[in-house]
């Protein structure tokens, strides 16, 4: 055991002794249906913000749920030991994805269930890991410090967003109006994954995203396919034809200019990634597949970490009920997202998408676009003293060196916090690849929750030594 | 006025005098939500069968709603004037299509509303024309005979099906078990359209149909598109790619063997159709289109009357709610139907569809098929004395000669009645192209209802003179 963790014996013992309490508090948070994309859940989403602010107040923070044009922003501040102690901003989000398809959940998505797993126990519920479970890793670390030592070793600010799953529309304006209030030395974000259940990781590359909904309109109303079939344009056939043009035969995305700003990853980085020993077979077999599919000439890790991609996330049109209805739909809709890598301009990508579809559209059709998100990729500096301190703390807790990794996901807030507040982020998360993020039966291993709490305690202590 | 109609003065006067009663009775029928494809409506569908049987009993029929493995079959019989009078079987269906998309209805779909139209008044509701309104045209003609003369001029049998909109699974077994009970000289079906609002029509060509649902499976569960996007097969992209292969660049369907049995329509028939003066611009502009789209080298009329086609009727997969969800769906579904013409074997077409998709499927995907209907095209003899009598009666009522036309729609019962009962059908219907069949705001012009009732009275009288 290292010096840091032995100095922290009291805090670590408290974390272990109160772990069932931590689990209970996480379950309480998971019961609040804070689905930010669905206006029918607005009241619950607001209630979730109040609940988070309440938890922080109980730990000695000044905390409030601040109104925005969208969902509230939870903002909290703890004075720490001294005025000149390092100041750490923690970012997380209390909103969650919708639960659908609800019929595929083994239990009700918002009624958390503890089940046995090969790793001990896990909690199953929407938001278990993304991001409520991860938010609890730092909140419970704060609690352990508070309860053993009466205070925190650093000054701490907390920003919990309620719109991460719906494109963060209120985040940038809020940051712009609160630059002073949110000022800090570094930002810590727990919304990413570990390398594997025994090996911690710090994520240094995040893909950006453009998410766009497209709707193809044809006839002015739904038609009987007997009367009109084969004689008029069919918007579903047309949409399928358009979507089929998104990739070429080499798995490359065909939007104009899509790869123009994509940098080649240096050979030494690719070599380093190969040496990580990524278990591609295991990654794929866990989701029932034998082979990957993507851009020719790149490994699965490269395809998800450093190559831009395009996937259709949803499609609907015409009759979708049971049995048969012989209709030609008047319109059909697809939701489509591109993951972006460093130097791609999201606005330019969005324009390329629109141009691609417009130029291929049948003249009797009309197309509408609605953008649900547009943010660039992020790289985090790997040579800062904060990262070194965090890495050391993680290594202490896990007894294994923390890996520096990329991720296919996007956390728009990290870009905004860099641009607007001028603060770099440390992405230290405790999720696993098989956590079913955004899917039915989302779960968080309790061993990850516990190690996450311990890691945040160790990191906070390590940060305290930096000034 | 011809001899037939002047002989019918009393009946026609009764039809006119009681027309508001006819409208009320139609509205009562339309209020019963007999959606046969939706198990949630089973009780209402059964209630609709009982309601129809009750109406027929009140007109002096022996009537009952007979149980089947699916929805009940309404069977009724009226002895007519003498044992050797011609016997006419009337076929119709009391089930209707689902109302969705319900948000596009101006009123509640099952709460019929009478509104003003350029042709007088119309009734707007699901089933207004397909087929409840059309069923009422012959039922109300029977009622007028009963009320003025105490009986009908022919022996009459009635068969009302409750599964026409869901592929008629119980029809063939029912016909096979009831050959004697349903025996008749000719069958009359009112489930087709007029040439235009002033010109009656008898439909002599009906397309067949193969309706199949296909589901493409990929990963074993829904995935986060950030973690997996660009690295694994996406079932929605894959489904789109498959659907995009259904037509070639000439608008021809690409399923293997699809056109093998398709007969070329003789040049004299094509010439005759051109002389019908079909208003293609009006047909298209009514649905908001400038140009048709279909198989190269054929007119809109030919594309819908005598050429086989394929249309996607519904598609869904992944996230279909508001806003964004960054998911890769584990599966995606399309509902697809082919309209068939004479001599195409529906079973062979179904096999061709399966072969087409299976041979193009990505090896990491799996595809399932579910057939919702499989029936051949029908041609009705144009030289029978029944058709001549019906045509004469229609000409008397409308003062214009009835056209002999084709239609793009399918009425599987007509084929079954021919094959199992050995009875040809006369397809005399009173719908219009703009009735929004299978679409929101389905309607039936009251002038069509009235002329339909009058036509059925005149036809019944004309049939009585045939033996």
Image (cartoon, coloured by chain):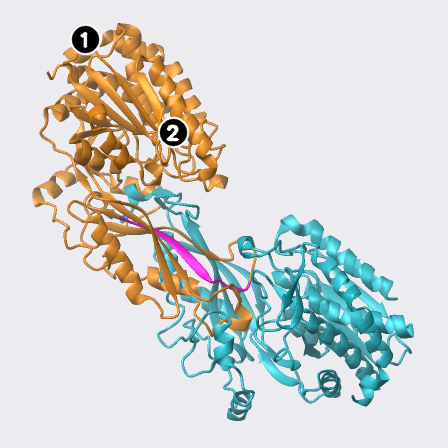
Chain colours: A orange, B cyan
Q: CA distance from mark 1 to mark 2?
A: 31 Å
Q: Residue A389 in magenta? A: no
Residue A27 x, y percent position in the rendering: 42, 23
On the rendered structure, is B28 left or right of B364?
right
Per the rendered image, the range of residues in magenta is A326-338
Neighbor class of circle 2 (other Cα within 10 Å; few <14, some 14-19, many 20+) is many
Residue B97, quarter of picture: bottom right
Residue B452 x, y percent position in the rendering: 72, 75
Residue, x 72% and y 77% (percent of image)? B422
Q: Label 2 belongs to which residue?
A: A128
Q: Is residue A465 above or below residue A246?
A: above
Q: Residue A327 in magenta? A: yes
On the rendered structure, is B466 left or right of B122?
right
Q: Are marks 1 and 2 on the same chain?
A: yes
- The local secondary structure at tag 2 comes to loop
Q: Is residue B344 above or below residue A5?
A: below
Residue A93, quarter of picture: top left
What secondary structure characterizes most of the magenta part? strand
Q: Label 1 belongs to which residue?
A: A7
- Nearer to me, B18 or B410: B18
Chain for numbered disc 1:
A
- The local secondary structure at tag 1 comes to helix
Q: Earlier in the sequence, mark 1 or mark 2?
A: 1
Chain for numbered disc 2:
A
């Amino acid at each position: 055991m290292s010096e840091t963790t032995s100095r922290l014996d009291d805090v670590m013992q408290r974390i272990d002794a109160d772990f069932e309490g931590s689990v209970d508090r996480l379950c309480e948070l998971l019961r609040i249906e804070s689905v930010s994309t669905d206006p029918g859940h607005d009241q619950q989403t607001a209630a979730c913000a109040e609940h988070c602010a309440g938890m922080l107040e109980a730990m000695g923070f000044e905390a409030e749920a601040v109104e925005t044009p969208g969902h509230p922003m939870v903002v909290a501040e703890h004075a720490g030991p001294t005025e000149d102690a390092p100041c750490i901003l923690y970012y997380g989000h209390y909103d969650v994805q919708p639960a659908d398809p609800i019929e595929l959940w083994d239990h009700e998505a918002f009624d958390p269930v503890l089940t046995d797993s090969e790793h001990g126990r896990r909690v199953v519920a929407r938001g278990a890991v993304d991001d409520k479970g991860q938010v609890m890793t730092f909140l419970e670390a704060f609690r352990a410090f508070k309860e053993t030592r009466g205070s925190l070793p650093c000054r701490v600010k907390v920003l919990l967003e309620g719109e991460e799953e719906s494109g963060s529309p209120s985040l940038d304006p809020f940051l712009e109006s609160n630059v002073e209030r949110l000022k800090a030395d570094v930002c810590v974000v727990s919304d990413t994954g570990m390398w594997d259940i025994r090996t911690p990781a710090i994520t240094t590359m995040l893909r950006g995203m453009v998410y766009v909904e497209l709707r193809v309109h044809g006839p002015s109303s739904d038609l009987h396919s007997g009367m009109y079939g084969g004689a008029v344009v069919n918007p579903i056939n047309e949409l399928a034809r358009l979507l089929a043009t998104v990739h070429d035969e080499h798995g490359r995305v065909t939007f104009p200019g899509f790869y123009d700003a994509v940098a080649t990853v240096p050979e030494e980085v690719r070599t380093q990634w190969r040496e990580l020993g990524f278990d591609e077979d295991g990654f794929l077999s866990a989701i029932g597949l034998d082979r990957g599919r993507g851009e020719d000439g790149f490994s699965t890790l490269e395809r998800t970490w450093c190559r831009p991609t395009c996937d259709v996330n949803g499609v609907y049109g015409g009759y979708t009920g049971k049995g048969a209805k012989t209709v030609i739909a008047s319109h059909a809709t697809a939701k489509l997202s591109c993951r972006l890598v460093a130097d791609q301009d999201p606005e330019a990508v969005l324009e390329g998408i629109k141009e691609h579809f417009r130029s291929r559209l049948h003249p009797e059709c009309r197309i509408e676009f609605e953008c649900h998100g547009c943010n660039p990729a992020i790289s985090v500096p790997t040579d800062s003293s904060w990262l070194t301190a965090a890495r050391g703390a993680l290594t202490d807790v896990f007894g294994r060196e923390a890996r520096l990794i990329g991720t296919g996901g996007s956390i728009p807030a990290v870009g905004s916090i860099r641009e607007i507040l001028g603060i770099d982020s440390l992405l230290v998360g405790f999720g696993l690849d098989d956590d079913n993020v955004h899917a039915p039966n989302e779960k968080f291993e309790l061993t990850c929750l516990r190690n996450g709490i311990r890691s945040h305690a160790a990191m906070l202590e390590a940060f305290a030594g930096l000034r």
